[in-house]
Amino acid sequence: DTGVSQDPRHKITKRGQNVTFRCDPISEHNRLYWYRQTLGQGPEFLTYFQNEAQLEKSRLLSDRFSAERPKGSFSTLEIQRTEQGDSAMYLCASSLDQGATEAFFGQGTRLTVV
Amino acid sequence: AQTVTQSQPEMSVQEAETVTLSCTYDTSESDYYLFWYKQPPSRQMILVIRQEAYKQQNATENRFSVNFQKAAKSFSLKISDSQLGDAAMYFCAYRKNTGNQFYFGTGTSLTVIP
C-alpha cells in the first residue's frame, strides 16, 4: 500500500455540472476525512467517516455535496450543480483511530469550475 | 470553538541556518494533540512532528523540534540546519483527544535561500 490515493488529480468542469471524486485510503485505516483547501488557506474540514458510517459533517457541506463510503473502503465525494465557488483542492485523509495517530493525506483533487 | 493561528504567512531562512515557525491555538480542552504538517509544491501533506498535550517534554524528530507552551497555548516549530528540501508550506494543526477532525492554521510558506 503506497498511501492515500485520490482520483482524478485535476478536474475542470462547467458550472452546473456534477462531479465525483474518489479516495482510496490506506487499507487498514478505518477513519476517512474529506477536507477542502482554497488558495492561501489551510484545509477546512468537510466530513468524516468511521468505517462506512458518516459520523460528522461540516456546515460547509451544503446539500449539493454528498459523500459515501460503501463497505468502509474507498469513498466518493460528489458535488452537484457545481458553482465557481466550489473551485478548490479537495483533500482526502485517513487514519487508524483516535489519539496521537496522525492523518495521512492524499495528493488531492484540484477542481476548477468555469 | 477551536482555532489555530499562524501569524507568519511567509518566512525565509538561509540554508544551514535555523528558523522558527509560530503557532497559537485556542481551546478549552485539556487533552489534545498538536501537529505540524509540511505541504511541498506537489501538495501532498506530510506529518513533520506531533505533540501530545499531556506530555511536558517537547517532541523532537531529527532536525525538527517544537516548543510547546501549554499555558500560553503556543506550539512553535524549529527547523535546524535548514535544507533546500525544507521549502514548503507548513501547517499547524490541532485535534482534541475525543475529536474527529483536525483544525488547521492558514499556513506559513517557508523559503530556503541557498
Image (spheres, grey):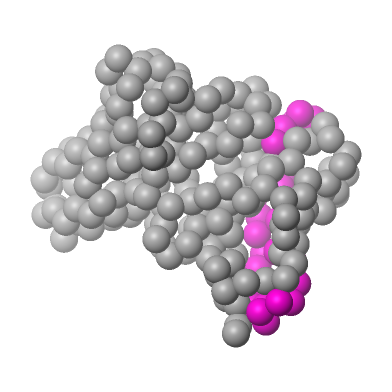
Q: Is residue A102 above or below residue B48?
A: above
Residue A2 locus on image (x, y percent):
39, 40
Left or right, A91 with respect to A76, comes to: right
Residue at 69 percent across and 43 percent down: it is B50
Whether residue A77 is visible, yes or no, is: no
Left or right, B26 with respect to A54, comes to: right
Residue at 65 percent across and 59 percent down: it is B6
Q: Residue furthest bottom?
A: B114
**Quarter of image, res A91:** top left
B49 and B8: which one is in front?
B49
Residue B27 falls inside the magenta stretch: yes
Q: How many marks?
A: 0
Left or right, B94 with respect to A71, comes to: right
**Quarter of image, res B7:** bottom right
Residue at 56 percent across and 23 percent down: it is A97
Residue at 70 percent across and 36 percent down: it is B33
Q: Quadrant of the C terminus of chain B?
A: bottom right
Q: Is residue B107 above or below residue B57?
A: below
Whether residue A74 is visible, yes or no, is: yes
Residue B85 falls inside the magenta stretch: no
Q: Quadrant of the N terminus of chain B?
A: top right
| Stretch in magenta | B4-33
B30 and B80: which one is in front?
B80
**Quarter of image, res A10:** bottom left
Left or right, B75 with respect to A5, comes to: right
Residue B39 locus on image (x, y percent):
50, 57
Q: Is residue A87 above or below residue B17?
A: above
Residue A112 locus on image (x, y percent):
23, 57
